[in-house]
Image: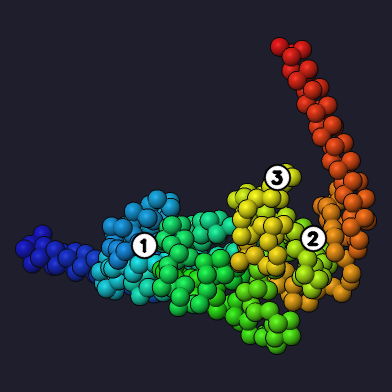
Amino acid sequence: MNLLNLTSINRSELITASVVFIIVLSVVVTSRLTRLTGNEAIEISTNIQLTFTEISDLDDLEYKLDSLSVSYDSEELRWAATLLGWRKYQRGSYHFEGHYSYNDFLSKMTRGIQDAVEIIILPGITIERYSSVIAEQMHFSRDELLSVFSDSVFLQEKGLSSQELFGRMLPNTYLTYWTRTPKEIINQILNEFNNKVTEPYEGRFKELRYDVDQIVTLASIVEWEAKFTEEKPRISGLYWNRLDRGMRLQADPTVNYALGERRRLLFEDYEYDHPYNTYVNRGLPPGPITNPSLNTIEATLFPEDHNYLYMVANPEGGHVFTETFSEHQRESEKWRIWLREQYRIKRQQEALQNSSTSSEG
């Protein structure tokens, strides 16, 4: 084989190799470019939440992806982030589930397009529990949120006491953003209260000659007193009857609030000297004892029309309502007899259990 033929073979092999290289390179580049904008780069099978407490980089992102067991190509992710310029991620909370291109996945966090966080506020809770529930979903602590309720400047700005402010924390499911401050969250809920209560029922407040916070205070007592929704208008009507007659409200929930715990009350508890004890003081207490729900506020605004002045608990968890004190005494005695029987049964069961345990020993 002469030199000319050898040169031709080498040149042919070189051309072939170059063509193969170009084809492979084109495939790789095309594949990667496709993954920049195609929805196959990152697959996340279950909903995940990526939260950045400060502006973060690729190292932080990879650490979070690894901790959540997300499968991805680290080298390719870094290549895409560098090429696209999505290398810094804004403080916030981001939810992902499904298939994403690198462009969609990375740009969302770089541009700070957060997903809403869901906050569920329940009725009839304490201010401490309220603060804990919200703080669990947000970037701030329970104590930071609690401090707003004692912020004199903020309270003065709103024209509310600490308890009045909490009474307006209307139970509902709220969508908000993880980066919002405690004051922003409280303002969001206050706006909801104004939209659902203050504005729609402005005329009703004038008819009753009670302001918003007085109605919320009475509703907060109904909230703790009523186990069943259907009883709320009746309980509300009973308290309105007492107020109209100048009677003391004598509402057990106010004594529980004054004592700082919800439990079965003792006789001496009713004499506890406290501004919120409606067995000692006439009229409404100084403020709400909890955050009433919208339907409780509505039941307070539109009470059932009746002549009941007294009520006592019944075994089903509701109440027996009566018009006279003598009727109330008879129903109260029935309740006490039932309670004594329950205690007797409980003691008997405990004795049998202890006896059984001793025999086994």
Q: Position of residue 202 (x, y in %)?
A: 67, 86
Q: Nearer the viewer, residue 188 or 325?
A: 325
- Please give the residue where the numbered disc 2 appears in the rendered image: 228
Residue 275 shows in this picture: yes
**Is 215 placed left or right of 350 in the picture?**
left
Q: Quadrant of the N terminus?
A: bottom left
Residue type for callout 2: Phe
Query: Which residue is pictured at 93% across the width and 56% down the height?
Result: 327
> Tag 2's secondary structure?
loop
Q: Nearer the viewer, residue 347 or 47?
A: 347
**Is 219 placed left or right of 95 in the picture?**
right
The span from disc 2 to disc 1 (Cα, nearest Å) is: 43 Å
Give the label, 2 or 1, closer to the camera.
Answer: 2
Q: Please tell me in which quadrant of the rendered image residue 10 appears.
A: bottom left
User: Given contact means CB atoms under 8 Å apart, are the residues at marks 2 and 1 in contact?
Assistant: no
Q: Nearer the viewer, residue 62 or 150?
A: 150
Q: Position of residue 14 (x, y in %)?
A: 17, 65
- Please give the residue where the numbered disc 1 appears in the rendered image: 52
The span from disc 1 to disc 3 (Cα, nearest Å) is: 53 Å
Indicate which disc residue 8 carries: none
The span from disc 2 to disc 3 (Cα, nearest Å) is: 28 Å
Q: Position of residue 238 (x, y in %)?
A: 82, 67
**Is 80 placed left or right of 129 in the picture?**
left
Residue type for callout 3: Glu
Residue type for callout 1: Phe
- Please give the residue where the numbered disc 3 appears in the rendered image: 268
Label 3 crowding class (10 Å Cα cut-off): few <14, some 14-19, many 20+? few
Q: How is the image coloured?
A: rainbow
